[in-house]
Image: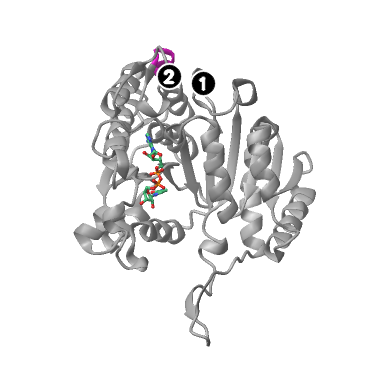
């Protein structure tokens, strides 16, 4: 078994349900670390609202230093109503965007997998979603979320006008398309590139660049293109037609949440954000869910499955990653459910109990 001596993780619990779900995931991490002799160590840090309260900034210098030296980061979620009215540039979510861009975490991998045990939790008919396994590869550090100029200005007639800029360079498109092609070659070999090339020049270049890269380096990948409005529709009509979807920051944000809901609960879905060398930040797809924070009802499985992704993609510890995924399958087989995935005849458990059950299944 590999020993990854001196590999360091930074844990950022964040806000809302963040501390609860991260605590459950940390217990799972502790158990696999022992069981597979991984030699991982970790420390805690502050991000988002918690960091604003302690340091006046959502991504303070001390967190930035910790993040740069870590090999991987595990994040809960950030944000909450208590920080909604502070100045936009220091809101909790800005800290997260800054961290992603400072570490160049440009590739966001968001699997949407429907565990067969949860086929009933989806709002779609079981035959449409059963066995769903798609991977959305979203560009995370470019596009309209970062493009300049941006702002709200006053026009000559006194009316206010908001504006943002959607911008992608060839190199940014190539590196995210490369990730999608590499991932597809380990899966079903199919990539669907999503754009709005009929209207937006920036995505016309996207489409051309993705096509050229495939022709030059990935002749065996089956590449298709789809407009984003059609992709949104196809995801609910026939989601199993997709294998890997690659798209920009804005479209990826929306489509990945839509894909998440196909699986029944956003509380089940992990994500990874990687740089060019495989360093990554791992977090659940959902937010800080302030509406249920502190009540021991949040589903910790997305965060626990994020630990599995971390072991697979950054630490290359496939056996340990698989063990976590199998343990999650095992607790679902036992009929344990948090409120968000509860169905008739199952046993309702809290955040803490769900985490403990996964640890027990690992034993
Ligand atoms: P959300 O994902 O936090 O919640 C949406 C709904 O899903 C809520 O009803 C919530 O209770 C439920 N939910 C989410 N996670 C759950 C879980 N693990 N178990 C059970 N139910 C769960 O999205 P939102 O309400 O739009 O945003 C809340 C806050 O989170 C905002 O401040 C937002 O900015 C922030 N946010 C942060 C991130 C992040 O940290 N990556 C992502 C999205 C939103």
Looking at the image, is 318 positioned above or below residue 247?
above
> Where residue 46 sits: x, y (%)?
27, 52
- In this rendering, would 344 be left or right of 127? left
Q: Which residues are magenta?
A: 330-335
The residue drawn where x is 27% and y is 40% is: 293
Answer yes or no: is residue 222 visible.
Answer: yes
Determine contact: label 2, label 1, CB under 8 Å: yes
Closer-to-camera residue (202/311): 202
SS of the residue under disc 2: loop
Query: Which percent across, then down, holds residue 109?
Result: 53, 43
> What residue did someone put label 1 on?
120
Q: Which disc number belongs to residue 144?
A: none
Residue 276, position in %: x, y?
Answer: 54, 52
- Quadrant containing the N terminus in the rendered view: top left
Looking at this view, name the residue that lies furthest to the bottom: 156
Query: Most prominent secondary structure in the magenta stretch?
Result: helix
Q: In the picture, which quadrant includes the C terminus?
A: top left
Residue 237 image position (x, y, % from top left): 67, 34
Q: Determine whether the residue tagged by mark 1 lies in a helix, strand or loop.
A: helix
In the figure, is residue 310 to the left or right of 157? left
Residue 199 lies left or right of residue 360; in this view the side is right
Q: Quickly name the residue at label 2.
A: 343
Q: How far apart are the alpha carbons under marks 2 and 1?
A: 8 Å
Quadrant containing ligand 1: top left
Of residues 287 and 279, the one drawn nearer to the viewer in this rendering: 287
């Amino acid at each position: 078994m590999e020993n990854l001596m001196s590999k360091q993780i930074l844990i950022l619990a964040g806000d809302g349900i963040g501390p609860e779900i991260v605590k459950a995931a940390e217990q799972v991490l502790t158990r696999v670390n022992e069981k597979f002799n991984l030699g991982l160590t970790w420390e805690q840090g502050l991000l988002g609202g918690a960091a604003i309260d302690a340091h006046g900034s959502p991504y303070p210098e001390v967190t930035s230093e910790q993040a740069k030296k870590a090999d991987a980061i595990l994040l809960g979620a950030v944000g909450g109503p208590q920080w909604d009215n502070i100045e936009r540039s220091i809101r909790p979510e800005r800290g997260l965007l800054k961290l992603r861009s400072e570490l160049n975490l440009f590739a966001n991998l968001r699997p949407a997998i429907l565990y067969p045990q949860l086929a009933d939790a989806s709002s779609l008919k079981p035959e449409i979603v059963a066995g769903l396994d798609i991977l959305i590869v979203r560009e995370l550090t470019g596009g309209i979320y970062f493009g300049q100029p941006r702002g709200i200005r006053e026009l000559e007639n006194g009316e206010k006008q908001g504006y943002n800029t959607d911008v992608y360079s060839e190199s940014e498109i190539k590196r995210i398309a490369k990730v999608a092609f590499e991932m597809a070659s380990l899966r079903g070999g199919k990539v669907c590139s999503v754009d709005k090339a009929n209207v937006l020049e920036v995505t016309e270049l996207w489409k051309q660049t993705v096509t050229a890269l495939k022709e030059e380096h990935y002749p065996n990948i089956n590449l298709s293109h789809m407009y984003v409005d059609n992709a949104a529709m196809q995801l609910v009509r026939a989601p199993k037609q997709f294998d890997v979807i690659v798209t920009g920051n804005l479209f990826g944000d929306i489509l990945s949440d839509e894909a998440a809901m196909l699986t029944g609960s956003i509380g089940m879905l992990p994500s990874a954000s990687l740089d060019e060398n495989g360093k990554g930040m791992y977090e659940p797809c959902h937010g800080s869910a302030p509406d249920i924070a502190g009540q021991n009802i949040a589903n910790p499985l997305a965060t626990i499955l994020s630990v599995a992704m971390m072991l697979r993609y950054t630490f290359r510890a496939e056996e340990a990653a698989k063990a976590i995924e199998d343990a999650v399958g095992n607790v679902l087989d036992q009929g344990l459910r948090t409120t968000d995935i509860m169905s008739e005849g199952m046993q309702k458990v809290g955040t803490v109990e769900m985490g403990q059950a996964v640890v027990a299944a690992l034993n």
